[in-house]
């Protein structure tokens, strides 16, 4: 199990994978993509990676603490809390010392001279031997109302809510319980042993009011009535603390957790050990292998690619046979166990920061602002297979940083993940584009370069003539409005099927061009090769093609003209027409093996041929990734998707998210796509990026795709104050004379309005250089709104 079963570049044959093409020396990294240092493996493994919303760089990320919706602690609230508290403490102190006699209080005005209640609120000193009177109730009610008024004046409920809402739920519930018990000890001190104070004047006023209203003491002999009043008071004083402490939601959470554990039984949790000690292997009883890998990590012989590769291989080792192969490989090779078939354990250079455990590459930093949610403010912006699986559309003018700040980091990340066995990547770019060097890829196809080691199979190693015809029809006629792709595919299938039946292989592109042009000798030879009765069906296909030749509705001449773009002397040794010195590469191989492939398009002078090849690669990729049984992610990156977007490719792109695959499409402007496909293209991709410098026309498409949101607006209007009283008018006139402005008052109107998340004008003029507006969607359906990201951060 040292490898992943990768065979050769054509898919499933028995030849080994050829070495990557290119010079042995690694070229220097361009200045705008500096070399990045590899992380310290032990610290990198042990760093937590909490679950976060799409696009957040999870390495070293900490979940933000949500601010409470209510109870803001403003300076006015603090002053309102402190002043009544200080005044109350001063009055209390003077009262207990006898400096302020009780008769001076406001309560003295409502009581006779022979009735007074000295002392404090907590320890009242009442006259003994007196009967129950309604005035006692007035005393208690006065104290209750006074305390309520002071609490409202100081904003105490808001302060308590502010305090408790910022604590964790169990701690908040415990503090609320202690506060409730302390409050009840003032009301029912006899129920709390050791409490030495007298009851607060709450229960007695209630009974006094009952006596004053009923005029009878018979109710007090009823145990049901007395304990009912006690129960009502307990609920009354406990209910606010239950709300502050969230007792009921906490109880429901505990009850649900208990029921879940009862239903699922005891869960086997992984040991609480650092990830560098490989706790997953130890939990499965593989202690020897875990010790070997731990020693390799601590000795510095494992890098992040090795750790991610071994971790991925362990997750894939489900059967006993694969577990045995895994353990044997670890014991024999240690850090180099289960290496990629190419033997590479890292890329020669890196230009971006990567976290291979999370499968992310950092492309910048989310900019904090009013539109940015709390979870995204100032943290790293990252891309990974969970978001690239919904496909990414990047639009920006030349020089905006599409290649060096987005495409190059994504290709590098997918190439690193291919070394771990979790990904296959195909990068299509123009010759000379500053992507990774040749040694970072397993297969490099340089179309039109005689020094190229690999060739591109135009039929993707297909055995089905209809499928092969669909590839070629999409490439040749996908951008033509005068001819449908289905008609072109039918015409091609009428030639490819008979040719394969006659000669056992599909024709080379020059031969196919001759058949499309209607060369009599070529058609006659093909007709003669199908004389056998077993080729009766194919003869009918060829006869149907011959009957359409020369008719006004025949698509063959137009296909031959487009095919002539590839039948040039510069491409004489490519597309299956060369000798055995150039190895053919089938794009179907990426559906079976974690390959790293780069396709260099022809240099200047063959722009239309480059677009045709790009459409061919896109059509083949979206078709071959449908193979069942693939566990790794397959990614296609088009550095320039001009002319590659067709109606059929848009439909296939939308289905990629359910096939563990995705494409990255980079465009200079949306005008490079037919206008009828603007809406379907934006709907087919789940991730959209608009770089700085886009036009208002391009920004309008993004604004329509991102939609609108409800926001709260405040309109402030100033109105002149006209006074009615002479003194007020004089003061206003003096103020106007001094300040030079009339006395006005502000009228504030708060409204909920619907506005665009990003308008076309904002995208065209408000995005700073080196920034972009990015929206993401994961394959699980999680969304990240369009936010501003600093690609240089």
Image (spheres, rainbow, N blue to C red):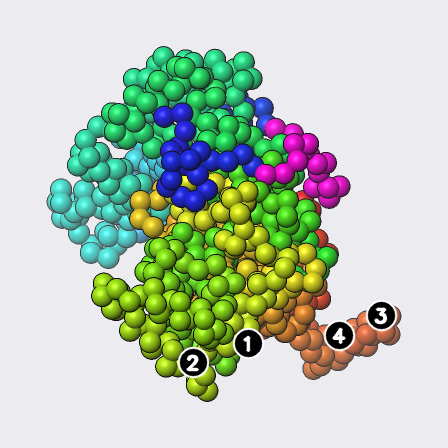
Q: Which residue appears at 46% of the width and 42% of the height?
A: 9
Query: If you read the primary sequence from the N terminus, does the residue marked by circle 2 or circle 1 appear first?
Result: 2
Q: Residue furthest bottom?
A: 552
Assign the magenta stretch its main secondary structure: loop
Magenta stretch in the rendered image: 21-38
Q: Name which of mark 2 and mark 4 comes first in the sequence.
A: 2
From the image, which quarter does the C terminus lie in? top right
Tell me residue 646's x, y (percent): 49, 69
Q: Which residue is mark 3?
A: 739
Q: Which residue is mark 1?
A: 675
- Which secondary structure, mark 4? loop
Q: x and y percent of residue 6 in the render? A: 41, 36
Q: Position of residue 321 (x, y in %)?
A: 26, 25
Q: CA distance from mark 3 to mark 2?
A: 92 Å
Which residue is labeled 2 in the image? 549
Asked if residue 24 is among those painted magenta in the image, a careful observer would answer: yes
The span from disc 2 to disc 1 (Cα, nearest Å) is 33 Å
Number of numbered markers: 4
Residue occupied by mark 4:
743
Q: Quadrant of residue 741?
A: bottom right
């Amino acid at each position: 199990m040292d490898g992943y079963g990768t065979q050769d570049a054509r898919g499933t044959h028995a030849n080994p994978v050829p070495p990557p093409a290119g010079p042995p020396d690694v070229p220097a990294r361009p200045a705008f993509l500096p070399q990045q240092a590899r992380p310290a493996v032990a610290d990198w493994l042990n760093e937590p990676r909490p679950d976060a919303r799409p696009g957040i760089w999870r390495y070293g990320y900490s979940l933000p603490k949500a601010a409470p919706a209510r109870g803001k602690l403003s300076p006015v609230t603090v002053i309102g809390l402190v002043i009544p508290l200080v005044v109350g403490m001063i009055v209390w102190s003077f009262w207990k010392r006898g400096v302020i006699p009780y008769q001076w209080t406001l309560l003295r005005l409502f009581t006779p001279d022979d009735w007074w209640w000295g002392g404090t609120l907590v320890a009242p000193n009442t006259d003994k031997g007196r009967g129950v009177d309604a005035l006692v109730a007035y005393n208690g009610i006065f104290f209750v109302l006074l305390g309520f008024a002071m609490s409202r004046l100081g904003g105490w409920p808001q302060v308590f809510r502010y305090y408790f809402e910022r604590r964790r739920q169990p701690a908040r519930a415990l503090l609320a319980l202690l506060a409730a018990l302390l409050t009840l000890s003032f009301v029912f001190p006899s129920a709390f042993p050791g409490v030495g104070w007298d009851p607060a004047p709450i229960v007695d006023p209630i009974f006094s009011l009952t006596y004053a209203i009923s005029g009878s003491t018979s109710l007090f002999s009823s145990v049901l009535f007395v304990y009912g009043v006690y129960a009502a008071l307990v609920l009354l004083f406990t209910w606010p603390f239950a709300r502050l402490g969230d007792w009921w939601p906490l109880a429901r959470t505990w009850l649900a957790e208990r029921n879940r554990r009862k239903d699922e039984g005891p869960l086997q949790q992984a040991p609480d050990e650092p990830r560098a000690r490989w706790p997953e292997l130890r939990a499965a009883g593989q202690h020897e292998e875990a010790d070997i890998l731990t020693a390799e990590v601590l000795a510095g012989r494992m890098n992040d690619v090795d750790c991610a590769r071994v971790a991925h291989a362990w997750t894939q080792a489900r059967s006993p046979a694969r577990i045995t192969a895994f353990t044997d490989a670890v014991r024999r090779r240690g850090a180099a166990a289960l290496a990629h078939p190419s033997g590479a354990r890292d890329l020669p250079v890196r230009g971006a920061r990567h976290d291979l455990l999370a499968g992310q590459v950092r492309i910048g930093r989310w900019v904090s602002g009013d539109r940015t949610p709390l979870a995204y403010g100032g943290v790293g912006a990252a891309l990974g297979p969970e978001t690239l699986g919904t496909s990414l559309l990047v639009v920006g003018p030349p020089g905006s940083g599409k290649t060096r700040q987005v495409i190059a980091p994504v290709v590098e990340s997918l190439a690193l993940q291919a070394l771990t066995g979790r990904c296959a990547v195909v990068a299509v770019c123009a010759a000379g584009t500053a992507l990774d060097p040749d040694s970072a890829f397993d297969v490099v196809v340089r179309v039109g370069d005689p020094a190229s080691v690999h060739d591109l199979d135009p039929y993707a190693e297909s055995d089905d003539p209809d499928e092969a015809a669909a590839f070629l029809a999409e490439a040749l006629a996908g951008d033509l409005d005068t001819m449908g792709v289905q008609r072109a595919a039918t015409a091609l299938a009428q030639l490819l099927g008979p040719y394969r039946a006659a000669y056992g292989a599909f024709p080379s592109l020059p031969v196919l061009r001759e058949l499309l042009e209607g060369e009599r000798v070529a058609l006659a030879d093909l007709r003669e090769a199908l004389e056998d009765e077993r080729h009766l069906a194919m003869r009918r296909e060829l006869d149907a093609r011959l009957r359409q030749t020369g008719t006004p509705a025949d698509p063959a001449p137009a296909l031959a003209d487009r095919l002539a773009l590839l039948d040039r002397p510069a491409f004489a040794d490519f597309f299956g027409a060369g000798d055995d010195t150039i190895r053919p590469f089938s794009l179907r191989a990426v559906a079976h093996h974690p390959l790293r492939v780069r396709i260099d398009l022809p240099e200047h002078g063959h722009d239309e041929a480059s677009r045709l090849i790009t459409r061919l690669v896109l059509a083949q990729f979206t078709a071959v990734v449908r193979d069942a049984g693939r566990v790794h992610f397959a990614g296609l990156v088009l550095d320039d998707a001009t002319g590659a977007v067709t109606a059929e490719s848009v439909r296939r792109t939308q289905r990629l998210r359910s096939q563990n695959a995705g494409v990255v499409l980079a465009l200079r402007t949306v005008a490079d796509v037919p206008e009828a496909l603007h809406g379907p293209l934006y709907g087919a991709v789940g991730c959209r990026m608009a770089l700085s410098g886009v036009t208002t026309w391009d920004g309008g498409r993004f604004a329509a795709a991102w939609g609108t949101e409800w926001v709260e607006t405040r309109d402030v209007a100033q109105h002149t104050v006209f006074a009615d009283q002479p003194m007020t008018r004089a003061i206003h006139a003096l103020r106007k004379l001094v300040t030079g402005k009339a006395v006005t008052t502000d009228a504030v109107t708060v409204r909920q309005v619907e506005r665009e998340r990003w308008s076309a004008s904002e995208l065209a003029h408000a995005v700073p250089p080196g920034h972009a507006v990015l929206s993401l969607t994961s394959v699980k359906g999680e969304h990240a709104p369009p936010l501003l990201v600093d690609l240089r951060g």
